[in-house]
Image (cartoon, rainbow, N blue to C red):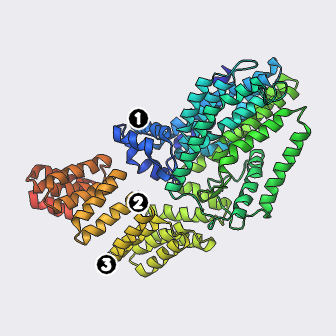
Amino acid sequence: MARLAVAAATALAFLPVLRNGFVDLDDLENLVANTWIRGLGPANLRWMLTTFHLGHWQPLAWLSCALDYRLWGLDARGFHLTSLLLHAANAGLFAVLAERLLACAGVPAERRLAGAIGAALLWSLHPLRVESVAWATERRDVLAGFFLLLALLAYVQGPGRPPRLGLALLGTVLALTSKASGMVLPALLVLLDVYPLRRLGGAVGWRSRTAQRVWLEKLPFVLLAGGAAAVALAAQRAAGALQSLDEITIARRVGAAMLQVGFYLWKTLWPVRLLPLYEYPLDIGPLQRSALAGAATLVALAVVALALRRRCPGLGAALIAYLIALSPTLGLAQSGPQVAAERYTYLALMGFAVLAGGVAATMIASAQRYALATLAVTLALGALTWRQCATWHDPRTMWSRVVAIAPDHCYGHKSLGDAARDAGDPDGAVAEYRRAIALRPLPEAHSNLAAVLAAQGRFDEAFEHYRAAIRIKPSYAFAWTSYGVALADAGRGAEAIEAHRRALAINPDLMEAHVNLGSALDAAGQLDEAMREYATAIRLRPTPEAYNNLGTLLVKLGRPADAVQALRQGIALRADIATLHENLGIALQRLDDLAGAAAAFREALRLEPGRASARAALSALSGPAP
């Protein structure tokens, strides 16, 4: 019952996420526009199992999103509900794990449950958990956490009880197919064997026959973790997410790692001014003040842990667990624009939570005082978490809060520009993009500004910003293909084709570049090549745009029946695009299906009443439209 209460309290604190939508930190690419999660057929499952989409291999996380889509469509509340329930379940599981760990550590029986409840609430309700729960894309975090906790529960059976290795291995496999963060599990298991399970070191020793068996148990876990690490690295490379040493030097990476090890500890103690993206500092290095402060925090804590190694061995164990869990994300192999991220603490801070719960339950003699202290901390953390959940409501809300906290946040201004652009405010978008560019040379800000300028017919300015984006980041494939679209709009078709080919030379799997190249080849009269590009785009990721372009090309080639099939497939993906219905009407008209054509034209006009071409086509079939 107590574990259920922990789960219920956790769910209550995170209820505001059910009012949130999707945000523009990968949610659009991963969920909204990702047609592969809209089914569970063989092709969909094959994609989930093999894709390195946006630099991640996470087949089980994709499957969970596909199941959400089956239940909720693209209603963000359904996705958030699943993540909330997973995190609440994790809170209950963590309470069970904490109780077993405290028992192994020798905490008196009458104090264990209270310590475990305190530990679980401290971990699950902390505002640093919000990013993992409120960001729909981070489903992989809470899902991997669920299976990692099951693996740890299978391993930690209680004082003197052997681990259930088969179940622990199964949990590890499921965790690794949800997110690569589970690669740290073998090291964590060795740490648990040392303390508090005492299966290694001490009286057992390190090389005794008993110890050798314990070491041998880890072999399958190490093999699984090593394979997951190799796949994760390959996924990052395939997506072009890894930063080169020219972009981020060794000195900057070391400085960033030093900053992080202290940053998360201080944010745990004082969880304010939290951001969905902590930008990589331009001046970070080992001698920079924040890096030195982070390293000093770690050294000070290590000195205390060493001094208390006999009286409080849990402190040293919690610190080592923290460093193990953080190790893959410390930035020595840097990907993305962030120097730190709150989601990286989901596993890393569990050890300190168990330590805090156990110490508090042991030191506060009065059960009533402990209960009151736990209630006060729970209410405080719950209130902060409730408020932080609202930050993730929508892109404009999120990035407005970011720039309110950090006015010089370049990515925040760029993202506010994106929000303004999506809202049909090009002037507001241009102003925000220019603010971002003034703060740092962000290639995405240059590219997105260029797209707005091109849409306004200001091609010379647009080309200048596209070239700036590519100069800053030569591997920016999307900027190349976006540049190609602008070149085509400016009537420079041959240059547009070359730009799209440059994008595909960088990233052959960039679906948008295949669609754009197909359009450029179509306009140049190279219809067979255009057909191949559309087919490749659909193979990579079926989209309404690709099917629409393919359908219009098939009409042009005198294949209206095939065109109808393609256009209907596009409508099946998104039925609210007037162009698809109008082109379907044209294809049906070529097949002499005049009733079907008229219905398609009417649907196009229902979706877009001012669409003159559809009105004219319907009028030609049946007289003036109503």
Report how far apart the C-alphas of labels 1 and 3 lie in the structure: 45 Å
Q: Nearer the viewer, residue 198 or 473?
A: 198
User: What residue is shown with label 2?
Assistant: 508
Residue 5 in view here: no
The disc, 3 or 2, on the residue closer to the chain's N-terminal end is 3
Image quadrant occupied by the N terminus = top right
Report how far apart the C-alphas of labels 3 and 2 lie in the structure: 25 Å
Residue 451: which quarter of the image? bottom left
Vertical placement of residue 594 versus 380, above or below: below
In this rendering, position of residue 102 left or right of residue 603:
right
At 14% across and 51% down in the image, what residue appears?
561
| Label 1 packing within 10 angstroms: few (<14), some (14-19), many (20+) | few
Task: Name the residue type under label 3.
Answer: Gly
Query: Circle 2 — which element?
Result: loop
Report how far apart the C-alphas of labels 2 and 1 lie in the structure: 33 Å
User: Horizontal and vertical percent for residue 271?
Assistant: 73, 47
User: Horizontal and vertical percent for residue 50?
Assistant: 44, 44
User: What residue is shown with label 3?
Assistant: 491
Look at the numbered discs 3 and 2 and tell me whether their residues touch, using CB distance below 8 Å: no
In this rendering, position of residue 146 left or right of residue 476:
right
User: What residue is shown with label 1?
Assistant: 71
